[in-house]
Amino acid sequence: MSPHRFEKTEYAAVSARSGVTQLPNAPGVYRFRDASKRVLYIGRAIHLRRRVGSYWTQPDGRLAEMVRRIVSIEALICQSEHEAAWLERNLLEQALPPWNKTAGGQEVPVYLRLDWQSGSPGVTVVHSIEPSTGVRYFGPYLGGGKVRLAASALHRVLPLAYTG
């Protein structure tokens, strides 16, 4: 379970293709359900209406079969893209629907590690916390790309590596 907590999250349930226009252009997580109310797929979007609608306009071979089975769509509206990413991850860790490929989603949690010990000061990106003196962790964050950019910017602003 993620340590990330969610504030107010709105919920909308609509019928399949005809209900897409009722979805907002907001970040969120969507679930496709079949006639038996089983979850077929869980995904996230920056713009729910656009992303969910794209399944009917450009389904590829593998997804075309899933799209034919969709009877209803549940959308959970989130406050940000980051909240949507965590929510999707938490839902996928609980259960992996048949059309999702990866439990937990594509991104992995990472942390910024601030080390101010003499000899090895600096900011690095790590995948786990190992408590020690002279070290502080920030996070977790999802996905390493943007966190690595942040660490790189911190190196330019606070060149700790030169202070050792």
Image (spheres, helix red, strand yellow):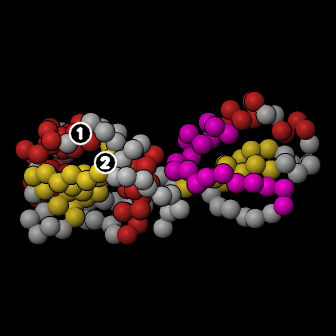
Q: Position of residue 93 (x, y in %)?
A: 41, 66
Residue 140 lies in the magenta-colored region: yes
Residue 85 visible in the current orientation: no
Segment colored magenta: 133-151
Query: Which type of secondary structure does the marked residue at label 1 adopt?
Result: loop
Which residue is at the front of the view, 5 or 42?
A: 5
Q: Farthest residue to the front: give it.
A: 8
Give the side of residue 103 with respect to residue 131, left or right.
left
Residue 58 lies in the magenta-colored region: no
Q: Which mark is residue 24?
A: 1
Q: Which quadrant of the structure image shows residue 91? A: bottom left
Q: Position of residue 81 (x, y in %)?
A: 41, 43
Question: Type of residue at label 1?
Answer: Pro
Residue marked by disc 2:
77
Answer above or below: position of 92 versus 46.
Answer: below
Sooner in the amino-acid sequence: mark 1 or mark 2: 1
Question: Type of residue at label 2?
Answer: Ile
Give the side of residue 43 with respect to residue 113, left or right.
left
Q: Farthest residue to the top: give it.
A: 156
Density class for disc 2 (Cα within 10 Å; few <14, some 14-19, many ≥20) is many
Q: Which residue appears at 20% of the width and 42% of the height? A: 23
User: Mark 1 and mark 2: span between their CA atoms?
Assistant: 8 Å
Q: Position of residue 154 (x, y in %)?
A: 71, 35
Answer above or below: position of 156 versus 4.
Answer: above
Is there a contact, CB below 8 Å, between mark 1 and mark 2? yes
Residue 83 visible in the current orientation: yes
